[in-house]
């Protein structure tokens, strides 16, 4: 810092009445600047939590800040403090892992600068033991130009939520007017930059654009988050070595884009990553003996390339039914069931099995697998064809016909989900049944809400809550000619282990884990074309655990 800047800092700090104690100046003067995107916290453990803010100085130089955690909102009882740096190398995001905090507490935190304090955030630490209930809010698929983030606004009003879990598609990578189209884009919900995000600076701008949303920013201020990415934080249908929406000829090397997406995610999100393991986001967060929350990466780190029915069938469609059926059989009996096909990767899969065993050995009641793509089987419904509107596109008609025909042959339609990696799914199902405590799977990605029972060899291996979407549209857009509840009943009739579904509304899940029970709510949002913190409806569901294992989903 130049002398001029230092003098400016000192005088402005004095004017603001915030001149810090001499020792802080000895350690480095606080900077002048502004907090541009509020505060956030995340990944609470029993003694620490990640704190986040973004602070920009007038000349773009690194910003020197202090942080404080207190037991009271007036910051009279400060229990931890330190310094933080908002560097241009991290897009001016400052992150600290505030440690030495008492377990199971609720705290206030803030950052201090020479221009004043940040907004005051609220956070908490996990209990170190015991069986206090854990209440999670589950979010996925928040596409800003499609609508208002009413799900976030509703969750911000609830005192009972301990932790917000976002399982991905927190942002979308597309250019303006792509998804949603220009016609579907809500007025005043513009994203920056205008083009598809490819470079690190693009990803940074997109996060800044999303985090300017007041409902998202306020929820981050009020609740700690635990986040994992899905594909759109990188680009559509990502796998380890590429993605459907990445063209190396025009968009550069895949490894560069992958690294840019990770860096932006790590800088902007209040997550704890691994200094020696770049691109690793899978990790564990324990909540006493109530739950072991296992945040997984099914999207990138160990994923083999997706298979796709339409790609496989396209070359033979004109050759007649026999050729089509042969192509279906070749894929279904060939590459699809290859035991080497991986979704988690060898290392994460071994880690997960060990974590399930660890949770059981510690007497933990629940293993909660927070991850991206739907785990349960998904079969198409031939009956769904009558729910297509008269002006349905040829593509949609073909898709619904194909998924129904596949289902008649016992084949699932969604090969981007666990259904495209059946050997990996069978291994994890066996591991959950054999080694784990009660297992609850949380999923996103699909834009509709599904509650599945996951069958093991002898008993239920898990229950899955696949959590709808904050704003991205789902099947209701394709199957639009349906009476109330008709879409849901048609799809449920084709999927015996699908215990409940909402294929109509946007929203989020609330899951409360207690020693012998899981109670859940599906909170359907008010119309997302207008900003609202209300809810259209709340459906209550429950699972019990006992000597014979999980009961499966029931309406409560
Ligand atoms: Fe999505």
Image (tube, helix red, strand yellow):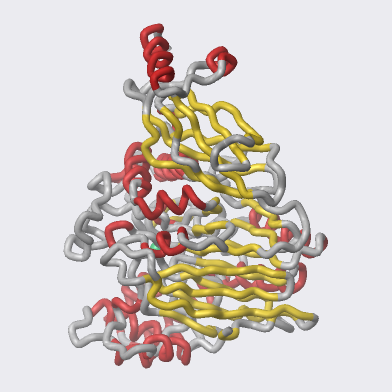
User: Residue 93: x and y, percent?
Assistant: 45, 35
- The residue that appears at 47% across and 23% down in the rendered structure is 18
Q: Could you tell me if residue 422 is visible in this image?
A: yes
User: Residue 456: x and y, percent?
Assistant: 68, 79
User: Residue 67: x and y, percent?
Assistant: 55, 32
- Quick one: 312 or 63, which is closer to the camera? 63
Does residue 225 sit above or below 325 in this rendering?
above
Residue 459 figure quarter: bottom right
- The residue that appears at 53% across and 78% down in the rendered structure is 451
- The single residue placed furthest to the top in the displayed view is 3
- The residue that appears at 41% across and 32% down in the rendered structure is 55
- The residue that appears at 32% across and 73% down in the rendered structure is 315
Residue 462 figure quarter: bottom right
Does residue 522 sit above or below 233 in this rendering?
below
Residue 536 figure quarter: bottom left
Give the quadrant of the C terminus: bottom right
């Amino acid at each position: 810092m130049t002398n001029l800047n230092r003098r400016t800092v000192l005088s402005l700090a004095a004017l603001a009445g915030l001149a810090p104690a001499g020792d802080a100046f000895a350690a480095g003067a606080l900077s002048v600047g502004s907090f541009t995107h509020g505060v956030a916290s995340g990944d609470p453990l029993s003694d620490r939590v990640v704190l986040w803010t973004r602070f920009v100085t007038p000349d773009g130089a690194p910003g020197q800040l202090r942080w404080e955690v207190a037991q009271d909102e007036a910051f009279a009882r400060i229990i931890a403090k330190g310094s933080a740096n908002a560097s241009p190398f991290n897009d001016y995001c400052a992150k600290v892992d505030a440690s030495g905090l008492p377990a199971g507490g609720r705290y206030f935190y803030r950052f201090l600068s020479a221009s004043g304090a940040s907004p005051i955030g609220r956070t908490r630490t996990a209990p170190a033991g015991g069986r206090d209930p854990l209440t999670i809010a589950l979010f996925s698929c928040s596409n800003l130009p499609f609508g208002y983030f009413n799900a976030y606004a509703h969750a911000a009003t609830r005192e009972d939520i301990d932790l917000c879990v976002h399982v991905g598609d927190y942002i979308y990578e597309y250019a303006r007017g792509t998804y949603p189209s220009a016609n579907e884009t809500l007025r005043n919900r513009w994203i920056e930059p205008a083009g598809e995000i490819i470079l690190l600076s693009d990803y940074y701008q997109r996060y800044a654009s999303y985090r300017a949303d007041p409902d998202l920013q306020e929820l981050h201020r009020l609740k700690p988050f635990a986040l994992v990415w899905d594909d759109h934080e990188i680009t559509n249908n990502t796998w380890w070595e590429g993605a459907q929406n990445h063209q190396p000829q025009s968009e550069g090397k895949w490894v560069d884009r992958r690294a840019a997406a990770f860096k932006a995610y790590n800088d902007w999100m209040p997550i704890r990553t691994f200094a020696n393991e770049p691109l690793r986001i899978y990790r564990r967060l324990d909540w006493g003996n109530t739950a072991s929350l296992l945040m997984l990466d099914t999207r990138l780190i160990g994923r083999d390339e997706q298979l796709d029915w339409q790609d496989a069938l396209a070359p033979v469609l004109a050759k007649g039914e026999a050729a089509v059926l042969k192509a279906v059989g070749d894929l279904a009996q060939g590459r699809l069931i290859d035991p080497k096909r991986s979704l988690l990767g060898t290392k994460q899969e071994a880690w997960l099995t060990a974590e399930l065993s660890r949770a059981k050995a510690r007497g933990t009641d629940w293993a909660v697998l927070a991850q991206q793509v739907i785990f349960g089987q998904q079969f198409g419904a031939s009956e769904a064809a009558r729910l297509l509107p008269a002006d349905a596109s040829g593509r949609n008609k073909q898709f619904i016909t194909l998924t129904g025909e596949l289902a008649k042959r016992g084949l699932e339609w969604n090969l981007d989900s666990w259904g495209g990696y059946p050997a990996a799914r069978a291994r994890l199902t066996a591991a959950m049944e054999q080694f784990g405590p009660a297992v609850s799977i949380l999923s996103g990605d699909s834009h509709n809400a599904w509650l599945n029972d996951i069958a093991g060899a002898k008993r239920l291996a898990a229950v899955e809550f696949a959590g709808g979407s904050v704003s991205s549209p789902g099947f209701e857009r394709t199957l639009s000619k349906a009476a109330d509840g008709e879409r849901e009943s048609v799809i449920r009739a084709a999927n015996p282990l699908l215990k409940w579904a909402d294929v109509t509304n946007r929203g989020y899940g609330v899951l409360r884990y207690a020693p012998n029970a899981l109670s859940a709510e599906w909170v359907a949002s008010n119309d997302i074309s207008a900003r609202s913190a209300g809810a259209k409806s709340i459906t209550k569901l429950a699972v019990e655990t006992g000597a014979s294992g999980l009961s499966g989903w029931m309406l409560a």
